[in-house]
Image (cartoon, rainbow, N blue to C red):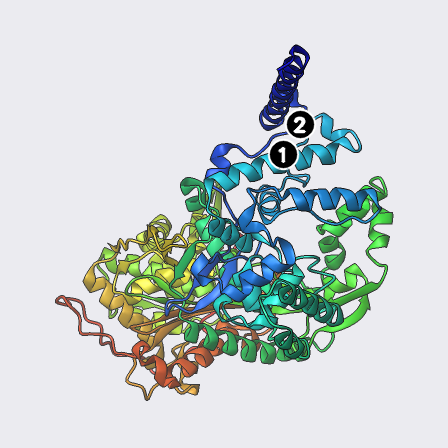
Amino acid sequence: MPKHATHFWEKLAVRLAQSVLFILLIVLSIDYNLFNLFGPSPKLFDLQNPHNDAASMLYAADGSLMGRYYFENRSPVTFDQLPPILINALLSAEDIRFYYHHGIDVKATAAAIYSILNGDRRGGSTLTQQLIKNLYKTRTDDQPGGLLQKIPGIGIIVYKAKEYISSIKLETLYSKNEILTLYLNTVDFGSHSFGIKAASNTFFNKSPEKLTSHEAALLVGLLKAPSYYSPVSNPEHALSRRNDVLMQMVHYDFISKKEYDSLAKLPLSLKFNQYKEGEEATYFKLAIVRELKSWCKSSGYDINRDGLKIYTTIDPILQNHAEVAMQSHMQSLQNKFYEHWQGREPWVDANGKPLLDFIENLGRQTPAYKSWLHHYRNNHDSAMKALTVPHEMTIFSWDKEIDTLLSSLDSIAWYAYILNTGLVSIDPSNGYIKAWVGGIDHRYFKYDHVNQARRQPGSLFKAFVYAAAFEKGLGPCDRRVDRPMRVKYTENGEEMVWTPQNANWVFTGINLSLKSAFARSVNSVAVQLTTEVGWDKVIEMAQRFGITSPLISVPSIGLGTSEVTLLEMVNAYAALANRGEFNAAVLVTKITTHDDKVIFIHQSQPKRVLSAENGFLMENMLRSGLSEPGGTTQGLWDFDLFRYDTDFGGKTGTSSNFADGWFVGITPKLVTGVWVGAEHPSVHFRTSQTGEGLRTALPEFGAFMESVMQDENIKQFRGKFPAPSVKITKAYQCTSPAYVPKDADSTVNSGIPPA
């Protein structure tokens, strides 16, 4: 070979080596983000352990799906769940040479460059490259860019180079089928459905393996532009795009022209099943989030991303009965409340006088006021004036939502007039929560009245007084005279005198058994017992029964002047119904990963907080309201409860000025509590005939339990209390006097100093 020819080939080899080395250096520089010029790329660990956000599933006690948690509604599938017709449609529309390239389709890339040069932007990305973009958000603001990416025109080159490099890596780590599966689990199909499983369910109400040819083509067609080709909002575009995909399948011999002619004539045939947040038991869903917050922090799991399976204690039949009972009762009660005030403003002080500037003061607490105050540079008058300007809004009404024109202050006044409620039902044997209703409508009232709101429980708190008295040695048939009391005590170093009253301002002078006094909810006897055992002992007893809210040590503590949550009170009463054995309230029994690996399981830890004898006596006391003359729970006789071989008991409670109505009812299998009141304690009924717990809260319990008793599908919630398991040394069958005080369940007008 001539010397000049040898020299040419040597130079060519050197140039090729230099070019390869240069390209290798560029690739390494981009991959390792040299001098922060290119921005970070997915690391090998990231590619080996791709994380695809998946929705967590929330299951009821019977295994039925109750809800999902997600940022992106997605449930992963495996490759064997993907029908061939879907894969063929995808390859036809997006990457026909997928099984023949190694992450980069040179021919498609060249065609894309040529189209750009000719003013026609055709995509050239392979499915692998699209997967890289979807998994690692390479072109979103979530990923910090390098210095070169900020230069116009250069940025897109850097983006593409990083995707090319990562695609090649991904192809070496995974099989083609694994990449396809990852891709179909990742992509956004629109209508809040991410991944093929969610999309199949959303648009056709079926699993992916049951998709037909035209359904698969429709879903694949959505990937080009989910909004533009949405079969819901743009059915004509969707139909055209679906048929384009079908024609591509003809072109690549996946279906025949005859099949196409038949399929192209078919309508979209949607069975749209979009998952809507508002359709769920949202109060309960968010209560789960609050309960799992510390567990997520310690375990490192994220219920919105990690595709967990969360198993709860909720019984869906009981939950439905609770919601129906609540809606029926609260709509009726709201109408009575409107009639009660006859169009007058219901926000009044303790003496019944209207509260001036009540709505304006509430307005100053709103985000809207703070926003206007900032806008007007701390000019209060201008900010308040802005709250009086009417604007379009949709407001809650029991009949139906109202589209109207109201100012912010008018809206506040509308909602201040509306009564709300909370209901929770617990199995006393294990603390399992079976039903949870946090309010009348979560779309408009976000605050959960089961375990977020704290209100005065009134006479419900007397149970802790009597439990403390029994522990000191007293029994149901011991007696106290219903008489006036003067209680001296020290508060903040100052000598105080408290003269409590009965709810009806009457002291009968009768020597009442404790059982009768409890059944009639006589304040004077409860106060006597509180002073005998000590109000700190009453607090200690309440805390023993699971009350964790702050309790103020004053003589009126036994009449329920410290604020607590409904869940605390119902859980405490569940322990009373369980004869002194306490179980912490339970919402979640088990959590697993998406592949059923158990990562949390509830372990019951029952604790005896009252002796078995005193526990039996307290259960008997709670049932006395139905049997003792003048018992405050006798409104339960108005409901169909007593032909199902089931024992009932309970206790009413009403706070000062009828601001809060309570009822906790017990059976051997369910303990259910109801709270009723307005969002603001200054809004309330004015009389005992309308505002006491036996008239506002007890009927909701009665309606709920009536439907539970009548339901033959849940007969397991019927039952009798068993005979006591220990010897009962204290008498509990007592002789009662004939005289019956009226309206004795309330602490209203009882001379209680404000806590």
Instruction: Decide which of 8, 337 is in the foreground and name it.
Output: 8
**Relative to residue 334, is residue 394 drawn left or right?**
right
Which image quarter: residue 117? top right
Instruction: Decide which of 617, 190 is in the foreground and name it.
Output: 190
Residue 604 visible somewhere in the drawing:
yes
Residue at the spot 41% in from the left edge and 61% down from the top edge: 569
Of the numbered discs 2 and 1, the one sitting upstream in the chain is: 2
Q: Is residue 378 above or below residue 474?
A: above
Residue at the spot 26% in from the left edge and 69% down from the top edge: 476
The residue carrying mark 2 is 38
**Relative to residue 687, is residue 596 drawn left or right?**
left
User: Which label number is shown at residue 351?
Assistant: none
Amino acid type at mark 1? Lys
Give the Cα distance between marks 2 and 1: 9 Å
Q: Residue furthest front?
A: 1
The residue carrying mark 1 is 162
Residue at the spot 43% in from the left edge and 60% down from the top edge: 80
* Mark whose residue sits in front, 2 or 1: 1
What is the quadrant of the N terminus in the image?
A: top right
